[in-house]
Image: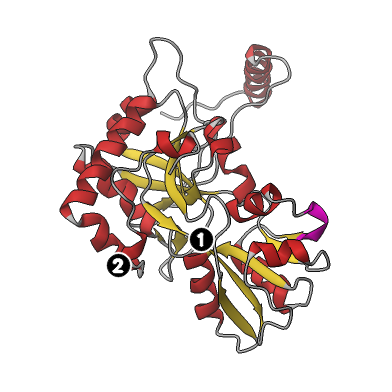
Amino acid sequence: MVTHRNPMKYCSVLMLLAFLGAACQPAGTAAAPAPTQAALAPTQIAPAATLPSPTAGAETTLQRIKREGIIRVGFNGEDPYDFIDTNGNLVGEDIDVIKAALAAAGVDVKVEGILGEWTGLIPGLLANRWDVIGAGMFTLPSRCAQAAFANPDYSVGIAMAVKKGNPLNLHSYDDLLANPKVRISASPAGAETIYGKNIGIPDSQFVFSPDTPTCVAALQAGRADVVISEELGLSTVLKKLNDPTIEFVTMSHQPKGSPGYGAMVFRKEDSDLRQLYNTGLAILLSNGQLAAIYDKYGLPHSMLPDPKVTAEQICAGGS
């Protein structure tokens, strides 16, 4: 039997329920939107969403990862470390290392990637938008004050890109410092920029861009005279670009602090997750699995880190 409702009475009930629901909502807050995810096999790309902060006695990040089988990774889209392939999947050396290291330590996970601006990766981590940064980030003492770096999974130096023929004869940071008219294209929070500022290169010489491809675009457009960036990432961008007017320059000598060590980054309170990852990474280094991941993405074995080098040493300003 079909029962016909009184339309006016039915609407009144709905309005009353809506009013009561609004009254229960804390002042100044809005109802959270339903979460959405674009599931891309084998790795998901998800919109940034703040995860609940662990409280005393509550589920830890590692416990939640084990329960869900998912680790949320903040990434920047830098080939060959973390990038979207032609099939729309998140891949790269960092992504494979995270999954392989945790698996070696006994925890199988799927990676859910969340794209972020380079300057927002550590703030996003601290705001619980992701569980780990997998973006080839150099371990620097200034960054160690904010977050917990894992042991390194690679080591690499800094290189330059210039116009064909290197018209300003630039081969080192000393050359950049000696010529105040040189316009330097770099990432605002990148290690390459920090190295330059440490020797006295002023902000006025920098032309900042969010990532290596846009740094190179500034050089192409004549807005900069030189690009400084992590060596392998810069080389990869230039090979894809295949621009005969741009030249790759190996530095005559590296700045202080380089070659740098790249690593995953965790929140300091997630020490159990970081330790588990470090345990797995040591296994990958010893059994050749890290070298195999290097081969997959074209990283030379010369970038393999010394297994004796720890995050604690680097953060303390040592090797």
Disc number for residue 59: none
Q: Residue at the location (41% across, 33% down)?
A: 312
Residue 234 in picture, x, y percent from top left: 54, 69
Element carrying mark 1: loop
What amino acid type is highlighted by mark number 1? Glu
Residue 237 in picture, x, y percent from top left: 53, 73
- Give the image quarter of residue 164: bottom right
Q: Which residue is mark 1?
A: 78
- Comparing 282 with 33, the one in front is 282
- Judge from the rendering whether residue 135 lies leftward or rightward of residue 199; answer left or right: left
Furthest toward the top, the residue is 57
Is the residue 60 above or below the residue 226 in the image?
Answer: above
Q: Residue at the location (33% across, 47% down)?
A: 98
Q: Which residue is mark 2?
A: 296
- Comparing 277 with 46, the one in front is 277
- Judge from the rendering whether residue 3 lies leftward or rightward of residue 277; answer left or right: right
Main SS class of the magenta portion in the image:
helix
Residue 203 magenta-highlighted? yes
Q: Residue at the location (28% across, 33% down)?
A: 276
Which tag, 2 or 1, sits closer to the chain's start?
1
